[in-house]
Image (cartoon, grey):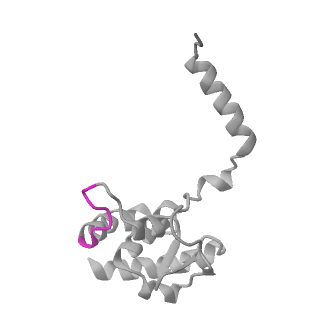
Amino acid sequence: MIRFSLRALAVATAIAGASSFSFTAANAAEPPAPTAGNPPSAVASASDVAAVSPANLAGLLNYCIMTDHISHEDGDALQTTVNEKTNAVPTDQRGNMDYAVGSSGQFEINGQRSTITSLEPDAQGRVCGAVLTRAKTIQ
């Protein structure tokens, strides 16, 4: 009979994972990208905000708040309202892919993805400003 120690298994898993993953402070601010769908093919701009779905907009608002381009003071209550009005976070717990894509800093427009994650912080801030402005119109 083979006995497994959960502690030994956890240590072995941690060692194996540590060799393939290095965590830096820069990684901490980057939310994970969704694994389904196509990878981003372009860099998004503030003008792209008008073309995204309401659920993708809600996800982008979430990304902008998480990365501090929109303050919690300005964004949290608005996020709740936008999520409710767009059903971006459905109660059935199935999730919404447009919201997930937006939460990773990606735009989905006509089946094509673009991203703001590769932009400089100032440019991301401008895009997030456009996200905030459009989100306020959903209120």
Q: Residue at x 33, y 79 (%)?
A: 136
Q: Nearer the viewer, residue 110 or 48?
A: 110
Q: Is residue 9 above or below residue 55?
A: above
Residue 5: percent from left, percent from top: 58, 16
Q: In the figure, residue 51 lies in which quadrant?
A: bottom left
The stretch in magenta equals 85-92
Dominant SS type (magenta):
loop
**How many callouts does the rendering have?**
0
- On screen, residue 110 versus residue 20, left or right, reads left
Q: Which residue is most to the front?
A: 1
Residue at the image point whose x is 61% and y is 52% from the top:
28
Front position in the image: 10 or 27:
10
Q: Nearer the viewer, residue 49 or 120?
A: 49
Q: Quadrant of the C terminus?
A: bottom left
Q: Position of residue 98 (x, y in %)?
A: 41, 71
> Compared to 75, does 92 lie above or below?
above
Q: Is residue 38 magenta?
A: no
Toward the top, the furthest residue is: 1
* Membership of 87 in magenta stretch: yes
Residue 132 in percent (x, y) is at 41, 77
Judge by depth and name the residue closer to the eye, 107 or 71.
107
Q: Is residue 110 above or below residue 39?
A: below
Residue most extreme to the right:
19
The N terminus lies in quadrant: top right
